[in-house]
Every structure is written in structure tokens, then in C-alpha cells.
Amino acid sequence: MDENNTAKADEPERAAETVTTTTEKKPGALRRLWRWFWSPSGKVSLGTLLIVGFVAGVVFWGGFNTVVEATNTEQFCLTCHEMENNVYKEYQRSAHYTNRTGVRAVCADCHVPKDWTHKMVRKVQASNELLHHFLGTIDTTDKFKAKRLELAKNVWRTMKTTDSRECRNCHNLSVMDFSVQEKRSSDKHQEALKTGQTCIDCHKGIAHQLPAGAQDAVDQLDRELKAEARK
């Protein structure tokens, strides 16, 4: 009886020791999270899947941006013979190509936005140009001349509605030193700053020749934009 009573008396102590041992061996929350993160999901751990996904995302994003930047180069633009045989030759005779300061503005500087959002919008719009390239809409000089006024008007519309955003990558009225400019230029720039005119209002035909009927197209464009603003 004494032995039985002693055994029974020892049982609570052994149970307490078991609980204490179990509590001591139970891993902390951080360790449990770490084990869960690396625990197998099928044949591959969740952590491995996340790391592989992250690396794949970086590679994809890097490749995507590389392609986007490659399409902004002058060499890429000249892969379309429509550009090389027509507007590029005019551009080579302009101040944007050769000047006393040695600063050259390439195609993308004038026609592709710098910020990512507007750049992507422009790239989507350019898919229509690629379509017409493959359709042969302006694949000869005669075809190009026939469409030139329409194409120019589209560019002027974009520049007017964006306040000549791409021009301002290099030129900004608010930081010009009018005192070192020729009087005519200084007067015009100061007037434009006061009245809110934008670069393309005066500087059409800077890099490319003005097509026949340009002034009538400009007047029509101004009327269209004013009508759209009233809506």
C-alpha cells in the first residue's frame, strides 16, 4: 500500500515535468513561421517558389525594359525605310542633328515621353504605326507625301495637348536667360511665357519640313481643340 501511495504521489510531479519539458521544446513563433515558410508544398517549398518567382520577375522586368529602351534608339527608328528615306534626311539638316554645342536630340527625345506611364501609352499607340508599316501605307515617297499633312497634324495635336512635353525635356521658358537671346527670340519667348503659349505654337518645321497646306491645317487644329475644350 505504501508503494502504491508513493507511486500515486509521484504521478503529479512526473506530469508536471512532462508539461515543462513539452513547453520548453515547443519552438517560438518566429521559428514556427520560418519552418512553415520552408515547409514542402508538394515537392517544392513555399520559400523556394517565392524566391524563384522573385528572380523570374526581375529577369522579366529587366528584359522588358531592355526591349523598350532598344525601341527608343535612332537605329531602331531607321529600320523602317519610310523614316530613313524621308524625315530622317530632313532631320540630318536640322539644328537638332548638328549644332554649335554638340547636343543632339534623337527621334525618341522628341516623340517618346520620358516618364514610364506616358511612355507605355505612346508605345501602345505606336503599334498602329507598325500595322501601317506592314500594310505599306506610306512605303514609297509619293505615298508618304500624300499622307504627310495628316501625319504632321497628328504630331502637332499631341504636342499641343501635352504642352510640348517632350520639347521641355531640353527647353523650358521659365529658366531661359532672355538677356542673352536675340531680341526677336527674347520678345517671343517672354510673350509666350505670359500668354501660356506652348513650343509647337511657333516652332513647327524645326526638325522636318512643313508640308503643303500646313497653315490651313494648323488653323483647323486650333478650331478643333477649342471646340473640344468647350465640351
Image (cartoon, rainbow, N blue to C red):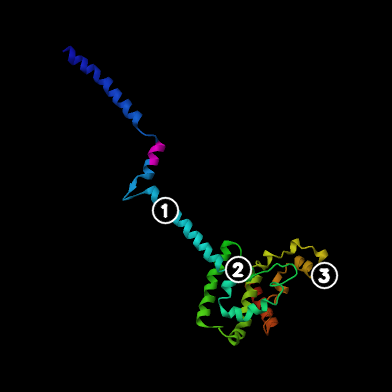
Task: Give, as a single range, the part of the protein colored magenta.
Answer: 29-34
Q: CA gap, disc 3 to disc 2? A: 30 Å
> Residue 53 vs residue 199: left or right?
left
Of the numbered discs in the image, which one, if any, rests on residue 182?
A: 3
- Position of residue 130 measured from the top left corner of the image (x, y, whole percent): 52, 76
Q: Name the residue under label 2.
A: 112
Please state which amino acid type lies under the numbered disc 3. Answer: Glu
Vertically, is 216 above or below 68?
below
Q: Which of marks 2 and 1 is in front?
A: 1
Query: Which quarter of the figure has residue 174?
Result: bottom right
The quadrant the N terminus occupies is top left
Query: Which quarter of the figure has residue 198?
Result: bottom right
**Label 1's element?**
helix
The quadrant the C terminus occupies is bottom right
**Dot placed on the residue nearer the N-terminal end, 3 or 2:** 2
Q: Mark 1 points at which residue?
A: 52
